[in-house]
Amino acid sequence: MKIIVALAFLLAATASAVADEKPVPLKDAPGRDMVEAACSACHSLDYIRTNSPFLAQQGWTAEVNKMANAFGAPIPADSVPTIVDYLTKNYGAGG
């Protein structure tokens, strides 16, 4: 019984923390709409900012291709250059 009460408490505390979380908007630049549509289909857009200190153009290209090819993200091949360009210019390493 103690375990059930502890789990219920933990679940309630976690739900409260998640409910207070505010999404971080992406930088307004050409390609943002395409990035938001493609990336948010599978995960939070906060991952972009999390990875941004580490990825330059080559890294973003590999990441976008991995999402499309390995994970099946809905990214049309002709959108990849625009998405990579946006990510590199706005969230590239050192940017």
Image (cartoon, helix red, strand yellow):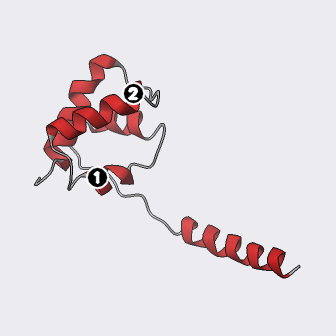
- Residue at horizontal 55%, vertical 66%? 18
Q: Is residue 10 visible?
A: yes
Q: Relative to 60, does residue 17 appear above or below in the rendering? A: below
Identity of the residue furthest to the top in this view: 78
Q: CA distance from mark 2 to mark 1?
A: 17 Å
Residue 51: numbered disc: 1
Q: Residues within 10 Å of mark 1 (few under 14, many from 20)?
A: some
Q: Residues within 10 Å of mark 2 (few under 14, many from 20)?
A: some
Q: Relative to 7, does residue 41 appear above or below in the rendering? A: above
Q: Quadrant of residue 94?
A: bottom left
Residue 77 image position (x, y, % from top left): 31, 18
Residue 68: numbered disc: 2
Q: Is residue 25 left or right of residue 86?
A: right
Name which of mark 2 and mark 1 comes first in the sequence: 1
Amino acid, disc 2: Ala
Q: Relative to 13, does residue 50 appear above or below in the rendering? A: above
CB-based contact (under 8 Å), mark 2 and mark 1: no
Name the residue nearer the viewer: 79 or 92: 92
Amino acid, disc 1: Asn
